[in-house]
Image: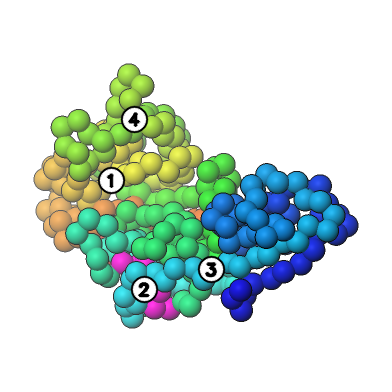
Amino acid sequence: MSADSQLFSVRGEAVGLRLDSFLASYLKEVSRTRVQRAITDGDILVNERVAKPSYRLHDGDRIEIDLPEPPPVDLTPEAIPLNIAYEDDDLIVINKPAGMVVHPGAGIDSGTLAHALVYHFDELSGNAGRTRPGIVHRLDKETSGLLVVAKNDVAHERLSDQFRDRQVFKMYSALVYGRVSKERGEIEARIGRSRHNRTRMSVLRGGAGRTAHTIFEVASRFQDFTLLDVRIKTGRTHQIRVHLAHIGHPVVGDATYDGGRENSISDVAIRRSVQALGRHFLHASELAFSHPRSGERLKFTAPLPHELGSLLKSVG
């Protein structure tokens, strides 16, 4: 057995419980998913035999736990500065800058948030895989703002559950083209890969794609633009950008979905400012969730980065 192995007998209140349920509560720093995998893989034995996760414990059963060390993350740590809004033993809240990709992908094998995380932190959840240490959710490359990272598997699992059950509050600031007529609106339109360009997402008809729900409210109006507070109840790829373009108000600076709207800006100085921005005007400004260990409701805010604040002054 390894140095971290344990051997003990079942007694008292543990009798009658499912093996996986008991171990998930006993091994507080290990997720239930990892426990079930360890049972199936034979890293946890009952009476020296491989048991099923659903096995009901009997008085005197001898449980042997020999969990392997988590596999090393296949990322080269990179000393990329991080803007840390909050940190404790279970999680980190990062204020991500525009231009940073969250994790490696096709053609991207350096300079990501994941590379920075493995440089700055010794412990990160492995639930999302070897190249996504601690990553619970993502922001697009050119979207700035708040995201949460898990330090251990239990925190990752509980945070992921909150995202899945839509218990996480996410607010974005988006500057869009045109004057939005409604003070408040909701967009419910299914999103999937564009049939004409597979690198883009699109609103799809006839039940295709995945359900997506976006809520927006006007924060400020300008002559040719509107600043919106946007909430999403689902987290589809490019959801806000696709939905706002779908209603005729694409995000300013979004070269993928704005349809060349920057060329229609009549004010030359503003048009040049938008062209020089180098990103889209979308910022994850608020994030709230329940702490995975204590249950305390946590809320974080991030002001507009300098380049977005400057553009907002110029359009006003």
Residue ID for mark 1: 251
Dot 1 falls on a residue whose secondary structure is: loop
Closer to the camera, 28 or 96?
Answer: 28
Q: Nearer the viewer, mark 3 or mark 4?
A: 3
Residue located 37% across and 67% down the image: 114
**Relative to residue 178, is residue 293 depicted above or below?**
below
Q: At x 27% / y 63%, what residue is drawn?
A: 99
Question: Which amino acid, by three-letter code, is at mark 2?
Answer: Ala
Secondary structure at numbered mark 3: loop
3 vs 2, front mark: 3
- Secondary element under disc 2, as helix, strand or loop, is helix
Q: Which residue is mark 2?
A: 116
Report x, y in % for residue 112. 31, 67
Q: Find residue 226 and report its image quarter.
A: top left
Q: Which residue is mark 4?
A: 209
Residue ID for mark 3: 68
Furthest-right residue in view? 12
Where disc 4 sits, the SS reads loop
Q: Is residue 250 magenta?
A: no
Q: CA distance from mark 2 to mark 1?
A: 28 Å
Disc nearer the start of the sequence (4/2): 2
Residue 298 location in percent, x, y?
A: 61, 60
Residue at 30% across / 38% down in the picture? 242
- Determine whether 128 is above or below 247 in the image: below
CA gap between label 3 and label 4 equals 40 Å
Classify the position of the N terminus by image quarter. Answer: bottom right
Residue 265 in sight: no
Q: CA distance from mark 4 to mark 2?
A: 33 Å
Q: Are marks 3 and 1 in contact (CB under 8 Å)?
A: no
